[in-house]
């Protein structure tokens, strides 16, 4: 019997076992309004993109779940289950400030490595990063990820993280802590310059409604 871990617009995630090991199955929702042939093509392309980005992230030193199997017909990815807490849940437990600084600085550093490898996560929220029992940070849910060398795309990735922090956590300095770690990125200056522009556009959009 599979346990449902999450349901979203793009699909659902369940926990089960595979060859005696705990396993997460991510299943993409089939778009019934599309022609079956087109849907199969787009689904395979999206699955390949997600897996490629996860492997690319792992290659550059960012922990991601191990891929066990990809079922293209059923649009499913089977991957390792990570025991731990999401950063969102962990922050809500109000951990010591020194631990917050330590882990969020590391989170920023890892995000910098991700961007140095031109991987755009696409959905960077504190729900998509897990702090495991051995204090490793794992990046999960690459369903919207893609590859891009554009500073603008990386800045938007950072801005999504900033907005997620502001909407779910009350501490105002969390973004600054993450950006401190991010500055170890080799290409951080161009991205941070663009982040200023992205923030301005975001504020204008909020003001205009």
Image (spheres, grey):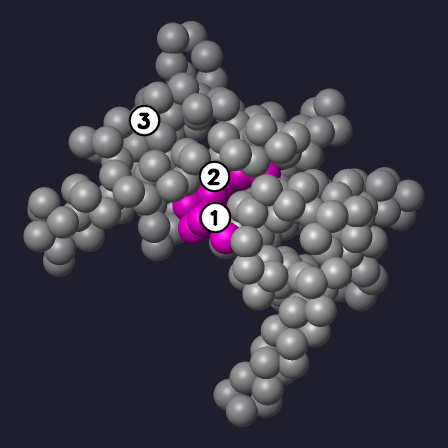
Q: Residue at x 53, y 38 (%)?
A: 140
Q: Which numbered disc, 3 or 1, marks the residue closer to the eye?
A: 1
The residue furthest bottom is 208
Placement of 31 over or under 60, stated as above or below: below
Q: Position of residue 72 (x, y in %)?
A: 23, 31
Determine which of the numbered discs, if any, sits on residue 24 in the image. none
Q: From mark 2 to mark 3, how far is it between C-alphas? A: 14 Å
Q: Position of residue 129 (x, y in %)?
A: 61, 42
Find residue 70 and name its label.
3
Calculate the distance from the C-alpha at mark 3 to the C-alpha at mark 1.
20 Å
Q: Earlier in the sequence, mark 1 or mark 2?
A: 2
Residue 180 appears left or right of 205: right
Q: Is residue 87 magenta?
A: no
Q: What residue lies at 58% left-to-right and 28% top-to-bottom?
A: 59
Q: Which residues are magenta?
A: 138-148
The tag earlier along the polypeptide, 3 or 1, is: 3
x, y percent for residue 93:
75, 45
- For mark 1, give the secondary structure: strand
Do the residues under discs 1 and 2 have CB atoms within 8 angstroms?
Answer: yes
Q: Secondary structure at mark 2?
A: helix
In depth, the one of 50 and 83 nearer the eye is 50
Neighbourhood count class around disc 2 (C-alpha, 10 Å): few under 14, some 14–19, many 20 upward: many
Q: Residue at x 61, y 73 (%)?
A: 198
Instruction: Say which residue label 1 marks.
Output: 147
Q: To which residue does mark 2 refer?
A: 53
Residue at the image point whose x is 47% and y is 18% from the top: 22
Q: Quadrant of residue 14?
A: top left
Query: Is residue 16 visible in the rendered structure shown here?
Result: no
**Secondary structure beneath label 3:** strand
**First in sequence: mark 2 vs mark 3:** 2
């Amino acid at each position: 019997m599979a346990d449902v871990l999450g349901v979203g617009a793009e699909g659902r995630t369940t926990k089960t076992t595979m060859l005696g090991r705990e396993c997460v199955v991510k299943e993409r929702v089939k778009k019934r309004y599309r022609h079956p042939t087109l849907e199969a093509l787009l689904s395979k392309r999206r699955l390949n993109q997600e897996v490629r980005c996860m492997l690319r992230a792992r290659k550059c030193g960012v922990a991601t779940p191990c891929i066990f199997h990809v079922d293209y017909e059923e649009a499913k990815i089977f991957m390792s289950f990570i025991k731990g807490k999401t950063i969102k849940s962990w922050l809500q437990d109000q951990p010591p400030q020194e631990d917050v600084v330590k882990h969020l600085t590391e989170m920023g550093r890892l995000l910098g490595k991700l961007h140095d490898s031109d991987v755009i996560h696409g959905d960077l929220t504190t729900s998509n990063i897990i702090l495991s029992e051995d204090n490793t940070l794992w990046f999960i849910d690459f369903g919207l990820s893609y590859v891009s060398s554009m500073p603008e795309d990386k800045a938007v990735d950072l801005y999504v993280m900033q907005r997620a922090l502001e909407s779910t956590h009350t501490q105002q300095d969390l973004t600054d802590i993450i950006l401190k770690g991010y500055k170890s990125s080799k290409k951080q200056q161009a991205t941070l310059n663009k982040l200023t522009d992205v923030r301005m556009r975001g504020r204008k959009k909020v003001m205009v409604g």
